[in-house]
Image: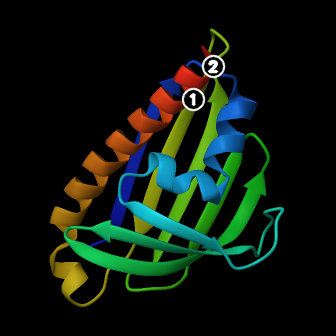
Amino acid sequence: MTVDVETSIEIDVPREQVAAFASDPENAPRWYVNISAVVLETPPPLAAGSRMAFVAHFLGRRIAYTYEVRELVAGKRFEMSTADGPFPMQTTYTWSDTADGGTRMTLRNQGEPSGFGHVTAPVMVRAMRRANRKDLQTLKRLLEDAAT
């Protein structure tokens, strides 16, 4: 079973600010509930090929994995995928302007679990959808509070 979870939110902050904050991996532990640490493996600035190691907790398990940036279009799109780890995953952020000057951010996670992960994929999808909603709500709160 393929995992494909897409979640969006509107944030009352200009697109450039949302994109800059969200695409900075060092900010991830501030708005991702499950991510506890990020270590850049390649020097800034981020570009295609940049690598970063994440430590997360998901469904009661500690997970360590490395993402590699596949595409970065400043203010519009950020795509990364796991270079190693237990679950091949691709994460994509996209940003677009809203009519009132804010930002619509979409977070999409796609992957193909194998082994036991293949069996638990339906549970994983529900948990990811719930976590992504919380993460985007946290991001919205952080950025809108900072803007006021």
Q: Position of residue 147 (x, y in %)?
A: 63, 19
The residue lying at 30 percent from left, 56 percent from top is 128
**How many numbered marks appear?**
2
Residue 98: percent from the left, percent from the top? 61, 18
59 w.r.t. 148: above or below: below
Regarding mark 2 in the picture, which secondary structure is present there?
helix
Whether residue 36 sits left or right of residue 48 in the image: it is: left
Which disc, if any, is residue 14?
A: none
Farthest residue, direction top: 100
Residue on which the image places disc 1:
143
Q: Looking at the picture, how far across and down is residue 76, in whole percent?
A: 72, 41
* Location of residue 18 by image quarter: top right
Q: Residues within 10 Å of mark 1 (few under 14, many from 20)?
A: some
Q: Amino acid at mark 2?
A: Ala
Residue situated furthest bottom in the rendering:
115
- Give whichever of 115, 101 is nearer the camera: 101
Residue found at x 36% / y 52%: 33
C-alpha span from label 2 to label 1: 6 Å
In the depicted structure, whether residue 2 falls above or below residue 21? below
Instruction: Please rate how many residues cluster around mark 2, counting C-alpha atoms within 10 Å: few if below 14, some from 14 to 19, many from 20.
Output: few
- Residue 110 in the figure: left or right of residue 42: left
- Report whether 55 appears left or right of 57: right
Residue that badge 2 annotates: 147
Q: Quadrant of the C terminus?
A: top right
Q: Residue at x 58, y 49 (%)?
A: 93
Element carrying mark 1 = helix
- Residues under numbered marks 2 and 1 in contact, where contact means CB atoms less than 8 Å apart: yes
Give percent across and percent down for residue 127.
22, 56
Q: Amino acid at mark 1?
A: Leu
Quarter of the rendering occupied by the N terminus: bottom left
Q: Which residue is drawn at the image coordinates 53% and 21% (left, top)?
A: 145
